[in-house]
Image (spheres, rainbow, N blue to C red):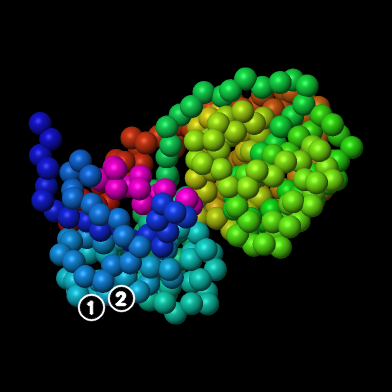
Amino acid sequence: MLIVHRTSIVIVTPALADANNGNWRTARRWAQMLSPAYRVRVVREWTDGDEALMIALHARRSAASVRAWRARRAGAPLLLVLTGTDLHRDLAVDADARHSVAVADALVTLNARGPAYLPEAARDRCHVVLQSCPARASLPKTDRNLRALMVGHLRDEKDPLTYLRAAARLADRADLRFDHVGAALDPALGAQAAALAARQPTYRWFGALPHAQTRRRIQAAHVLVHASRMEGGAHVVIEAVCSGTPVLASRIDGNLGLLGDDWPATFEVGDDAALAGWLVRLREEPALLSDLRARAADRAEAFSPAREADTLQGIVRGLL
């Protein structure tokens, strides 16, 4: 029989359901993983409460909640999760982000290479939690073409322009198709995506889609392209691997920290020529695509929900 503790936890996330982004999905999933044993609430900002533990996502964007927690709950533990831009950009330039790291009792990064970006004195407080998703079967695919898919809201950090340029390079290849899912957070990037879709039939931009529809498109794609300039632990990469869809990724630590140091299908940030070359090879060399599928299947075990839950629950028990 499960014994339910009365201990309460608050998860602070800078984005709630309306944003439909990675921070929200992490917060929701962790609340579900912890709720069998704890009372959990999820908020955008914490100002007061009697919770025993705060889990704060994003060092800069949750900084106000971190300061309020330390002022009102000085003796209660704080777990800070560095989710991406805070780790790779804000720590170098933002005093609020650095303060959040300094006062946290424990830290989490979402990929295996993340701790190296922390101040050396903070690394012994850092844990790695690889996020998860339920496995899904790959959907049937045609052999008449190769369908690439990029998923991510259109903003500079995701570098959608590299994907657009690669698609334009291959405009004369009717056997190479390019699908793109994500809202135009940067209107200028949205205008460029719309312009390419208008003139090139092999490129389709769907804008934002519900998560269930996006997941099915991942299952149906031959390959997921992930071109980001910086990442904390991109959940879409995990979803692809757990759907049997290989990933063609920019060579950044946030991607290699998920896929593994030996993941072969990578290209330098911004190198659309290399990305286009990989897509041509995957179309023309079926054995290469099969090898990447096998590598994805082997890697999927690292992203099991049970493993994520065990790791997270162990960190929480150690703090309470």
Q: Is residue 54 magenta?
A: no
Whether residue 50 can be seen here: yes
Image location of residue 291, percent across then percent down? 65, 26
Quarter of the image that includes the C terminus:
bottom left
Density class for disc 1 (Cα within 10 Å; few <14, some 14-19, many ≥20) is few
Residue nearest the observer in this picture, 250 or 169: 169
Image location of residue 201, percent across then percent down? 81, 38
Q: Amino acid at mark 2?
A: Arg
Q: Is residue 28 magenta?
A: yes
Residue position for label 1: 71
Residue nearest the observer in this picture, 230 or 197: 197
Quarter of the image that includes the N terminus:
top left
Position of 232 relative to 47 (above/below) = above
Q: Magenta stretch: give its range.
A: 20-34
Image location of residue 225, percent across then percent down? 66, 42
Residue position for label 2: 67
| Count of marks overlaid on the render | 2
Q: Amino acid at mark 1?
A: Ala
